[in-house]
Image (cartoon, rainbow, N blue to C red):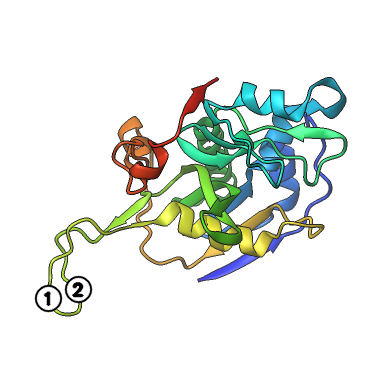
Amino acid sequence: MQINAIKTHKVSTNESLESVLNQCVTNLNNGDILAITSKIVSLCQGQVVEKSSVSKRDLIAREADRILHTDHNPYDLYLTIKDNILIPSAGVDESNSNGVYILYPQNVQAVAHTIWQHLTAKFSIENLGVIITDSHTTPMRRGVTGITLGWCGFEPLHSYVNKPDIYGNLLHVTQINILDALATSAVFMMGEGDEQTPLAIIRNAPKIKFTSLAPTTEEEKSVTITMEEDLYAPLLMAVKWTKS
């Protein structure tokens, strides 16, 4: 698998995302996957709030579906749930921004589908994947990796259920989360600082089953689980979440 990050200009608020892609993505092969950081999608949508207009705490409370109130907050970040994702500060970000808070993009699945339609037509290719990524933290691990917020063009999971391990034992629950595995690889190549490479082309990725339609509602739900079903349910349900 090869990943090539793409350098762009500094994307401005309310800039056309299609124009950014047309300018920066000059070649795609059949079977490629294009990774796009959610930040430039948000900027193109105008999903920004002037820092002078609201406190960060109030903005996070507004954007979160649920927020955990705590007196222990050494990094000025808040533990929240948004769009069924456990995420710091409801995705509200101030890095690589100029005097604004950048929010999560709106209708991220629809955006991924629109990008997929545009690029498959432009490059006359049948098999193409699109992922919209964000940086993400892992409990009790330093540093960030990646997560996919929206995608199109391929199946999101690779299942090993009822398949044997190396000793012939059948696996019962094991699945690979292709979305977040690809996002982590892409985020690593795109970087977090002044690299200015918010796009990446993933080539020759294994275990990909391309599709010709947008993900169904059932497919979208297949990559998430409820808090009650989660392995970490004893931790997640032991605290008091406030609905925003």
Query: Callout 2: helix, strand or loop?
Result: loop
Q: Position of residue 107 (x, y in %)?
A: 54, 28
Give the quarter of the image for residue 2. bottom right
Classify mark 2: residues with Cα within 10 Å, few (<14), some (14-19) or many (20+).
few
Residue 16 in view, yes or no: no
In percent of the image, x 57 and y 52: which residue is there?
137
Tag 1 and tag 2, C-beta contact below 8 Å: yes
Query: Callout 1: helix, strand or loop?
Result: loop
Judge by depth and name the residue closer to the eye, 206 or 181: 181
Q: Which mark is residue 165?
A: 2
Image-based side of 208 in relation to 71, left or right = left
Q: Which residue is mark 1?
A: 168
Give the quarter of the image for residue 141. bottom right
Location of the C terminus (image quadrant): top right
The number of numbered badges drawn on the structure is 2
* Amino acid at dot 1: Gly
Residue 205 position (above or below residue 126): below
Judge by depth and name the residue closer to the eye, 72 or 181: 72
Q: Position of residue 53 (x, y in %)?
A: 83, 20
* Amino acid at dot 2: Asp
